Image (cartoon, rainbow, N blue to C red):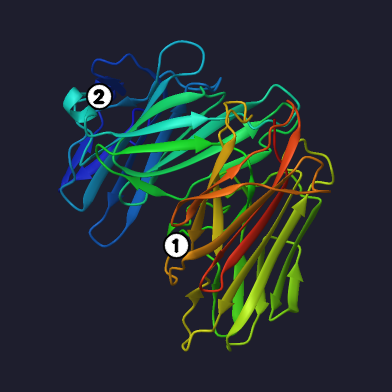
Amino acid sequence: AFAGDADVTVAGDTEVRLDGAAARPATVTVEGVPTEEQAATIAYSQHGQRGAEWAEAQYVWHDMPWAQPALLIAPVAAAGIGAFDTYRYAGLDQPGDGPSGYQYDLIFTDRSFGADAARVVTRAEQARLARVEQRFLHTDGGVGDTSTDHKRYGITATGYLLAERSTRGVAAVRTDHLTPGRWVDEAFYRNGIVDYGIVTAEPERTVVAGGVERRVWARQPLRTDWVEAPEADLMSFCQPSPTRRTMGNLHVALAQLVDAHGRFDCLYEDVPNRRMSLYRDGRLIGQAGEPVADFTVPRQAGTYRLTYDLSFGGTRAVTEAVSTAWTFRSTGPDSDESALVPLLALDYELPMSGENHPDGDRATVLVRQMPGTRAQRIRSTTAWTSIDDGRTWQQAPVAAAGAARFTVGLPAVAAGTAVSLRVSAAGDGGSAIEQTMIRAYRR
């Protein structure tokens, strides 16, 4: 299927030889839009009648010094026995140097390599692409020379990891156009001292034809959270599974620092101090020094308090320490099945500039609940702020903005001042959360 690869494939009972002289560069262009190829993949998979399967792929990333100038393909007949599937990926952006204001990530699936080595995405096909309005912030670490990077993975309908593309030093605002299908996104923060000190990623999602999504990356405050994606979607070893319990065990898995609910981290930095503790009816059940742990619990109903505390020993200008406490009521299931735990989460939308400094005086907080558990009415919300790293606290004004949404007034302070936040919410089913973030952001 590739120039330079094995030169024989089988179609029916005849031998088909690859004509290397007929190979042409595999290119993709977008009608009416100037683009430049940054990454490309060509892959095939063969399936025999009796279940055998094999596949091969060729990749190119043009920002690599050793990258090939192009991938070549030649026409190959469709399989007469079994199946022969081919895949192509193209990552395109705005021509020229500097950050691009738009990006195309395109996947094509065929039953064979045809003669259309040079593919053109017509205007009609463009209308079916999903659009993602991206905003990338720079997480202010007080060290200067910061940048935010982005990475995207594309997965075929059959589960083949086809596309992998990184863009470094991305523009503050960018519009992405994606082929409908399965994609995974993550963002990175670098500051010249710590390379990839923060990694924030999303579980796999399916984008739909003509759909519009909006994403904000690296917005402070960073905080600890749980992830609700089902285990079947665990495409990354960094993604924690949902917190669940059986008759005698409670499995807890947390993301240590995230910028939005539903995302998870690969915290490459060592965390000098971190501790998970579980209490049942006021009595300590157990502790762990990691964000993932299993605790032995009785099946009978009880009120639990789960805490997770992390700190960096005074070394960070922002996100110096995060402490979170979840309260919930839980009873073990009757069977050997596992059940989700009714945890709450706080999703923050602070009015941040591209450099993660506030350009407004009110933050919005949304209370999230674990899907698959009984919905609760949020009956109380409170907030406090501190400008002395949590030694003293001032209650902040809170106003309802919906059934599970409220706003918090931010203090007026001098530029460069570190502001800490403490926010709590409680539901009528016994679930509650209190979260403290020391140096949540800097004015």
Seen at 25% across and 36% down, the residue is: 210
231 vs 12, left or right, is: right
Q: Residue 349: tell me if it is visible.
A: no
Picture coordinates of residue 155, whole percent (x, y):
38, 45
411 vs 168, left or right, is: right
As drawn, the residue found furthest toward the top would be 96
Which of the two discs, 2 and 1, sits closer to the camera?
Answer: 1
Question: Of helix, strand and loop, which one carries label 1?
Answer: loop
Residue closer to the observer: 34 or 261: 261
Q: Residues within 10 Å of mark 1 (few under 14, many from 20)?
A: few
Question: Of helix, strand and loop, which one carries label 2?
Answer: loop
Seen at 27% across and 33% down, the residue is: 129
The Cα atoms of the two marked residues, 2 and 1, are separated by 39 Å
Q: Earlier in the sequence, mark 2 or mark 1?
A: 2
Which residue lies under the disc numbered 1? 230
Say if 261 sits above or below 107 in the image.
below
Residue closer to the observer: 396 or 67: 396
Quadrant in which the C terminus is drawn: top right
429 vs 180, left or right, is: right
Which residue lies under the disc numbered 2? 117
Under mark 1, the amino acid is Pro
340 vs 44, left or right, is: right
Quadrant in which the N terminus is drawn: top left
Picture coordinates of residue 157, whole percent (x, y):
30, 49
Q: Residue 376: tell me if it is visible.
A: yes
Picture coordinates of residue 389, whole percent (x, y):
80, 44
Say if 277 sits above or below 268 in the image.
below
